Image (cartoon, rainbow, N blue to C red):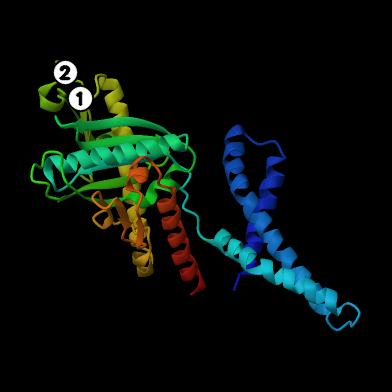
Amino acid sequence: MIPEDRLDQLVSRFAFLEAKMATGITPTELASMGREYAELRPVVATIADWRDLNERRRQAQGLLADLEMKALAQDELEDINAQSDAVEHAVMLALLPKDTADTRPAILEIRAGTGGDEAALFAADLFRMYQRYAENRGWKVEVLEESLTELGGCKEVIAAVRGDNVFARLKFESGVHRVQRVPSTESGGRIHTSAATVAVLPEAEEVDIDIPASDIRIDTMRASGAGGQHVNTTDSAVRITHLPTGIMVTSAEKSQHQNRARAMQVLRTRLYDLQRQQADDERSAARKGQVGSGDRSERIRTYNFPQGRLTDHRINLTLYKLDAILGGDLDEIIDGLSSADQAAKLAELAL
């Protein structure tokens, strides 16, 4: 059952924004209202289509009693019924609560888990996979912090990903990714299992999180690279500790000023994500069954190299095109996860 009062609210809000933007408002107000107006425009158009379809149905049903018009009315009703389910589904999707972070850039964090050097190599593979996906979509990736191994693996990498709807597309990637393959260092040909963790956080802006100077401690230190290479001789690396939560962030590039800015950027994002997680935890227990539960300790996906197979355990999706996926072809997986999340939310909305 579609709540008409909710549709009226959306249409009224759109009309208000349209009228308000036609008057003299500040550039800041225009930017804020413009984003909301752009988001509501397709929603209001969908509502108009649904209401137009219902009006056509009402008129056609009224003509069924007219013998001369009955055949025409029946044809019209068949056409309306053929469109009805799709239009009603579109309206229901429009009514789903929006995640305000969906349009934001994201901070991508990948860390090697169990499996030693092989886990670090897999973490590097995952990062390249996301880099290629970002490149395919025209996004920009900036590495903020990384810790590499002598074998070319990655103990940890933190990167900013910027572009259109980055968080919306990547938010279901958070969790434990498991790999099954024969490591290059394995002479006996045995398959090893190792893992890496991925966290995708919506990037926070300064207006989202106010961090008083009294809440942080900033330490400087010398930075060092893999195997003792690229050692800084000055104290340029920065570690920021958020005292209330104990969250620590480091950045170890050559510029101490840049390191402070990057570390604060990541700290704001982690605190913003912590707020979002706390708000999520206060919601209905029903959300625990949804795709987007945000549990980063959950094993979400297995990459099986001998069989060229990828399995996403949350939606029971198995694809036999592992090379293409590692090359950045992630849309089929991400679309499946998004659809499953929408279906879960629609089911909850119907309760």
28 displayed left or right of 266: right
Identified by mark 1, the residue type is Ala
Q: Is 67 rendered above or below residue 169?
A: below
Q: Disc 2 or 1, which lies upstream in sequence?
A: 2
Quadrant location of the N terminus?
bottom right
113 displayed left or right of 157: left
Give x and y (percent) for residue 255: 27, 19
Identified by mark 2, the residue type is Asn
| Rendering quarter of residue 313 | bottom left
54 displayed left or right of 30: right
Which residue position is annotated with label 2?
232
> How many residues crowd mark 1 within 10 Å: few (<14), some (14–19), many (20+)?
many
Which residue position is annotated with label 1?
237
CB within 8 Å, label 2 to label 1: yes
Q: Residue at x 82, y 75 (%)?
A: 73
CA gap between label 2 and label 1 equals 9 Å
Secondary structure, mark 2, is loop
